[in-house]
């Protein structure tokens, strides 16, 4: 059978990662193992893959309110005027910025992101369609891809959001924002220091603060108070920061740090020299810290992807399988009660008929007893077949009733589509006993396969630790990063080492070998060679 275009893209991704980061290439293989388990359970379609639901590039997203200086910050970081800026909302699309090999920058439609699994918005149109009918085909009005030849973008993807005002956003826009937050390695949340009265932005703060502070990955959120130069004449940046801290404390953010920045090209004319130098020092220190975190996202990307692999495997085991088992249990009960009701009624009718027809003679069904053996067997077989057919029809009806209940149940949330798909898959297995508590496709073999994927996730984390961390420092040459000391040849017990003999170099590969440089995805050429 010919491979689908999605499978071909995953193969190209795996080939590229073999050169860029072999550990992540192994993670792709583990995702494919997880795909086979999920397909056998009916949780995903035959052409779906968990590997396409994760961004394989380091992702930095920039969110915030209108006129908070998000685009100005990105232009400054990239070194080009790639995004329009202004005091009002100047862009109503989510913009993905990535490295491009062409001399001039270019803007590509949202289709370029929706159709490429290397980018974080692969098939986002389908998700948009699920929450807003008819909007999926308008993906170009939500997304755009911009490329430019800037070293700052090499090996990373930046996402610039339009000004965020939750009161006025449609469900599809909120879906994209949540999607961005989930897949990002670093989230910069911008606030405008010129507007320290956050009461009008209650919903914005709820979505960007209240719903994020309790996440397991809350440390990836940096809260940036931008355009702090507007406090120059009053020289009160601490008061402005305090006002915002009080506002965010009302939404649960009681710890953490505000990064205070403004554009480097701002000259602060007419401001006292001491005030100007103090603000520049604050700005430069905080900008340096932000840029250091941005440089760190490549390492965080690798851990994030391995974390997604483990999280997905455990989610199947601890959430989706129990939900499916509960659905099958409900189906079994519905079949039991429906069968009892129907067959009980049939027995009552049969008893009434035999008594009323005076066929009851010494507890013997006389017409059947008078038949020859062959005919009795044929009649019994026909009755058995009729009972089986009736039972399977009742089982089918019970399954449809259970499915209708699942569709009405609001407790599933994001699991709804996967559980409904998997339960329909179970309904098709007419040969499988409804009394079997395990969902279709699940058993000891699949449990072992899932455990193997979880073990591989742990091994990937250990491999990443070996690459980036050496707590003991043993085996490392002082002053030479990633270079192991030469190990002496082993000496037998009681034997003196040979005088003047140089120790041979260890044949073990360096566990801290740095990954090769990643030029990042390019919209003008395939990164996979």
Image (cartoon, helix red, strand yellow):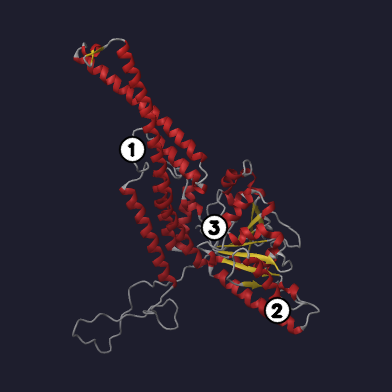
Q: Horizontal and vertical percent for residue 140? A: 65, 48
Disc 1 residue crowd, few under 14, some 14–19, many 20+, Cα 10 Å: few
Outermost bottom residue: 499
**Mark 2 vs 1: CB contact within 8 A:** no
Instruction: Tell me if I can see residue 261 in this picture.
Output: no
- The percent position of residue 123, horizontal first and vertical second, equals 55, 48
Select label 1 or label 3 by which is in front.
Answer: 1
Q: Which residue is mark 3?
A: 182
Mark 1: secondary structure:
loop
Pick whichever of labels 3 and 2 is earlier in the sequence. Answer: 3
Q: Which residue is mark 2?
A: 279
Between marks 1 and 3, how big is the CA–CA gap?
39 Å
x 32%, y 46%: residue: 443
Crowd class of label 2 (few under 14; some 14 to 19; many from 20; radius 10 Å): many
Among the two numbered marks 2 and 1 on one chain, the one whose residue lies closer to the N terminus: 2
Q: Quadrant of residue 244?
A: bottom right
Cα separation between marks 2 and 1? 71 Å
User: Which residue, given by chain and number where applicable, does mark 1 sit on?
Assistant: 435
Image quarter of the N terminus: top left
Q: Nearer the viewer, residue 449 or 51?
A: 449
Relative to the observer, which residue lies in front, 316 or 324?
A: 324
- SS type, badge 3: helix
Q: Is residue 444 above or below residue 434?
A: below
Task: Specify which label sits upstream in the sequence, 1 or 3.
Answer: 3
Q: CA distance from mark 3 to mark 2?
A: 34 Å
């Amino acid at each position: 059978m010919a491979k689908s275009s999605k499978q071909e893209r995953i193969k190209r991704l795996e080939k590229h990662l073999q050169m860029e980061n072999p550990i992540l290439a192994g993670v792709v293989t583990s995702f494919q193992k997880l795909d086979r388990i999920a397909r056998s359970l009916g949780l995903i379609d035959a052409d779906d893959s968990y590997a396409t639901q994760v961004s394989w590039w380091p992702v930095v997203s920039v969110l915030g309110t209108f006129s908070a200086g998000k685009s100005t910050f990105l232009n400054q970081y990239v070194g080009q005027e790639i995004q329009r800026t202004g005091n009002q909302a100047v862009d109503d699309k989510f913009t993905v910025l990535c490295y491009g090999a062409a001399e001039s920058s270019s803007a590509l439609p949202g289709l370029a992101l929706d159709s490429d699994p290397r980018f974080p918005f692969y098939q986002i149109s389908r998700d948009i369609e699920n929450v807003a009918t008819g909007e999926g085909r308008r993906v170009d009005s939500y997304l755009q891809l911009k490329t430019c030849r800037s070293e700052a973008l090499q090996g990373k993807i930046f996402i610039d959001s339009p000004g965020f005002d939750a009161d006025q956003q449609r469900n599809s826009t909120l879906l994209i924002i949540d999607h961005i937050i989930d897949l990002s390695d670093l989230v910069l949340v911008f606030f405008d220091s010129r507007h320290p009265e956050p009461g009008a932005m209650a919903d914005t703060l709820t979505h960007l603060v209240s719903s994020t502070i309790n996440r397991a990955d809350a440390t990836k959120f940096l809260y940036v108070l931008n355009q702090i130069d507007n406090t120059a004449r009053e020289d009160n940046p601490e008061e402005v920061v305090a006002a915002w801290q009080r506002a965010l404390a009302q939404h649960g953010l009681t710890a953490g740090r505000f990064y205070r920045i403004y554009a480097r090209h701002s000259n602060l004319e007419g401001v006292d020299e001491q005030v100007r130098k103090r603000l520049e020092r604050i700005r430069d220190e905080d900008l340096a810290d932000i840029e250091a975190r941005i440089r760190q996202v490549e390492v965080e990307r690798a851990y994030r992807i391995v974390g997604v692999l483990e999280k997905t495997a455990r989610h199947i085991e601890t959430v989706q399988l129990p939900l499916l088992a509960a659905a099958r249990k409900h189906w079994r009960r519905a079949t039991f009660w429906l069968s009892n009701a129907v067959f009980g009624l049939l027995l009552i009718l049969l008893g009434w008929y035999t008594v009323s027809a005076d066929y009851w003679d010494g507890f013997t069904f006389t017409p059947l007893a008078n038949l020859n053996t062959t005919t009795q067997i044929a009649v019994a077989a026909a009755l058995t077949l009729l009972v089986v057919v009736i039972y399977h029809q009742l089982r089918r009806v019970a399954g449809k009733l259970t499915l209708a209940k699942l569709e009405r149940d609001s407790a599933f949330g994001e699991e709804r589509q996967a559980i409904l798909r998997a339960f329909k898959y179970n309904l098709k297995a007419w040969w499988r006993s409804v009394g079997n508590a395990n969902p279709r496709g699940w058993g000891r073999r699949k449990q072992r396969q899932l455990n193997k994927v979880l073990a591989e996730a742990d091994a990937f984390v250990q491999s990443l630790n070996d690459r980036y961390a050496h707590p003991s420092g043993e085996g490392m040459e002082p002053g030479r990063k990633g270079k192991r000391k030469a190990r002496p040849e082993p000496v037998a017990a009681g034997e003196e080492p040979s005088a003047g003999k140089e120790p041979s170099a260890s044949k073990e590969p360096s566990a801290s070998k740095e990954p090769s440089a990643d030029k990042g995805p390019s919209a003008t050429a395939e990164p996979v060679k």
